[in-house]
Image: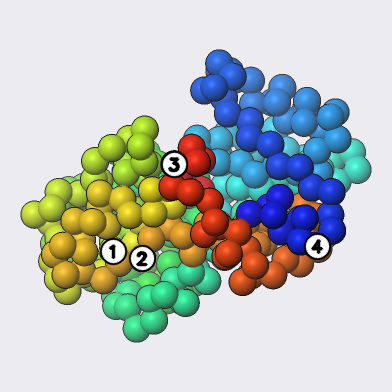
């Protein structure tokens, strides 16, 4: 998306994948990678799983959104400082407004409290969710995110779900922000027996576009939303932050859709 839109706008724009697994780099190399990117003249970086929170101590400044959310998905190199931004929150919110109009937000189950989960939790709050139940295998992360959301809103809107099936049974909608469903993490984050036709289910994974979760949900007659919209909207905002030029949303959508499913791209923001 980035390179195609850059070419369309006449910008000499190279976008490289720095894959820690492929390069054999440990997570502890993150600070060194940031420094090397700056030395090599990168204008910015997109940050993905699992570094959206761990990158923060290595940055000089956070935008208001990134500071509130506590997660970063875009780093911009400005002169001698690194600035962290979060475009995931806006990206999910815009995608939801576009694709899920009228969806019941009375009680939403959020699966995952990592970097992407934090952004989606704040987006759900902005969208008007009355109650957000958070389930994460790491109870400390769930507790921390719930406390952060409640402190920001000044009301007890966020809760920690202890049993995912019980929470799903009471939910009006479910959002998966875990990597479960990517090729590297096959499966579904909730069992098929927890799905009801009156639910809606969103998955922020975008490769594959139809995860096992979404296939099972569709088979159960459930309204669904894939990660495609969030991937495009967050990229629109990130492109502008990195280049200083506003991209065209329709063009970015066409660029995204032109990428084959087997392109080997990461599948979660």
Mark 2 or 1: in front is 2
Mark closer to the observer (3, 2): 3
- x, y percent for residue 244: 82, 59
Asked if marks 2 and 1 touch (Cβ < 8 Å), the reply is yes
Q: Position of residue 124 (x, y in %)?
A: 43, 67
Q: Is residue 241 left or right of residue 150?
A: right
Q: Which residue is mark 4?
A: 9
Q: What label sits on residue 29 in the rendered view? A: none
Q: Is residue 185 above or below residue 46?
A: above
Q: Nearer the viewer, residue 105 or 153?
A: 105
Judge whether 234 appears above or below 197 on screen: above
Determine which residue is flagged by label 3: 262
Report the side of 230 relative to 55 (left or right): left
Q: Looking at the image, can residue 193 be seen?
A: yes
Q: Identify the residue under disc 2.
A: 225
Give the label on residue 201, or none.
1
Real-space Cα separation, disc 1 to disc 3, in angstroms: 24 Å
Which of discs 4 and 1 lies nearer the camera? The answer is: 4
Residue 184 placed where, x, y %? 36, 33
**Which residue is at the front of the view, 121 or 219?**
219
Q: Nearer the viewer, mark 4 or mark 2?
A: 4
**Tag 3 secondary structure:** loop
Q: Secondary structure at mark 1?
A: strand
Q: Earlier in the sequence, mark 3 or mark 2?
A: 2
26 left or right, relative to 171: right
Label 4 vs label 1: CA separation?
Answer: 36 Å
The mark nearer the N terminus, 4 or 2, is 4
Residue 22 pos. (x, y %)? 54, 22
């Amino acid at each position: 998306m980035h390179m195609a839109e850059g070419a369309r706008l006449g910008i000499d724009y190279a976008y490289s994948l720095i894959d820690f697994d492929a390069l054999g780099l440990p997570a502890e190399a993150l600070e060194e990678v940031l420094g090397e990117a700056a030395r090599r003249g990168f204008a910015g970086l997109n940050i993905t799983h699992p570094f959206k929170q761990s990158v923060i101590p290595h940055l000089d400044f956070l935008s208001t959104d990134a500071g509130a959310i506590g997660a970063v998905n875009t780093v911009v190199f400005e002169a001698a400082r690194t600035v962290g931004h979060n475009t995931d929150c806006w990206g999910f919110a815009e995608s939801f407004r576009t694709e899920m109009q009228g969806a019941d937000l009375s009680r939403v189950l959020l699966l995952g409290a990592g970097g992407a989960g934090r952004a989606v939790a704040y987006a759900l709050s902005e969208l008007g969710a009355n109650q957000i139940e958070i389930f994460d295998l790491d109870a400390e992360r769930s507790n921390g995110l719930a406390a952060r959301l409640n402190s920001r809103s000044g009301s007890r809107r966020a809760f920690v779900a202890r049993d995912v099936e019980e929470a799903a049974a009471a939910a009006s909608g479910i959002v998966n922000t875990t990597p479960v469903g990517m090729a590297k993490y096959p499966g579904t984050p909730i069992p098929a027996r927890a799905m009801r036709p009156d639910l809606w289910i969103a998955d922020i994974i975008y490769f594959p576009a139809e995860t096992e979760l979404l296939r099972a949900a569709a088979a159960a007659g459930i309204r669904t939303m894939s990660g495609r919209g969030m991937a495009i909207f967050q990229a629109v905002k990130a492109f502008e932050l990195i280049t200083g030029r506003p991209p065209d949303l329709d063009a970015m959508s066409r660029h995204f859709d032109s990428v084959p499913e087997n392109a080997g791209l990461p599948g979660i923001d």
